[in-house]
Amino acid sequence: MSSIDDAVKRAIVSSRQPRDHDSRLRRVAARRHAGQGLGYLDRVAREREGAERRSRGLAPFGTVPATTSARMSAQKRTNTTPEMLLRKQLHAKGLRYRVNMPIPGLPRRRADITFTRAKLAVFVDGCFWHRCPTHATDPATRGEWWRQKLDGNVARDRETDEHLRRLGWSVLRFWEHEDMEQAARVVAAAVSRSDR
Ligand SMILES: [Zn+2]
């Protein structure tokens, strides 16, 4: 086929396409780039299964190192059910707090629930990710990699605690398996102590 035929063919093909063809392609590409294109439902299903497995203290299904940090930050951003429950209890007690406050001096680290006037930071730690003594599990596959990852989480937690205490803050941590009504009572008592 000559290059002229080629050019004519291209012109015919492009005239058949809807006027917004290019912008539609750009939108699809942008959605794919944002991870919302093809495979989006798969991703949602996998994340749901992962959350379900984590709540049972298991390693999330299909997790691989390359995507884990993205998943972990997604997990951190998500309002986990026990934390939501605690917040609801605190709110019912008339307490007001900040959620996910960035920790000054520690880039990319946030405190789950903070009472700034009382200088009190509250964390609800996931049993799998933060190694609860009752429910901690070491995944059978990639055991060494997971051990290092989870040890790193625990070390960061201790570093965060120490950092906050140096800034004059109190730190309360609860496991996600704990009774959040009881946790709310502990938090409320700490806040009222700081008022005296
Ligand atoms: Zn636990």
Image (tube, grey):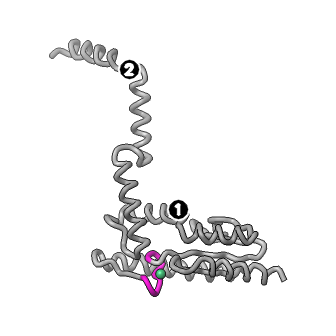
Q: Which residue is mark 1?
A: 78
Q: Quadrant of the N terminus?
A: top left
Instruction: Point out the tag, 2 or 1, that comes first from the N-terminus.
Output: 2
Q: Is residue 133 magenta?
A: yes
| Count of marks, rendered view | 2
- Could you say which is closer to the camera, residue 159 or residue 180? 180
State whether residue 106 appears in this view.
Answer: no
* Cα separation between marks 2 and 1: 40 Å
Q: Amino acid at mark 2?
A: Pro
State whether residue 196 appears in this view.
Answer: yes
Q: Residues within 10 Å of mark 2 (few under 14, many from 20)?
A: few
Q: Give the x, y percent position of residue 97.
A: 71, 67
Q: What span is colored magenta in the figure?
A: 128-135
The image's mark for residue 18 is 2
What residue appears at the point 75 percent right and 78 percent down from the top-left corner?
191
Q: Amino acid at mark 1?
A: Thr
In this picture, is 8 found above or below 179? above
Q: Quadrant of the C terminus?
A: bottom right
Occupied quadrant, residue 58: bottom left
Q: Is mark 2 within 8 Å of ligand 1?
A: no
What residue appears at the point 34 percent right and 20 percent down from the top-left corner?
17
Q: Is residue 164 magenta?
A: no
What residue appears at the point 63 percent right and 77 percent down from the top-left corner?
181
> Tag 2's secondary structure?
loop
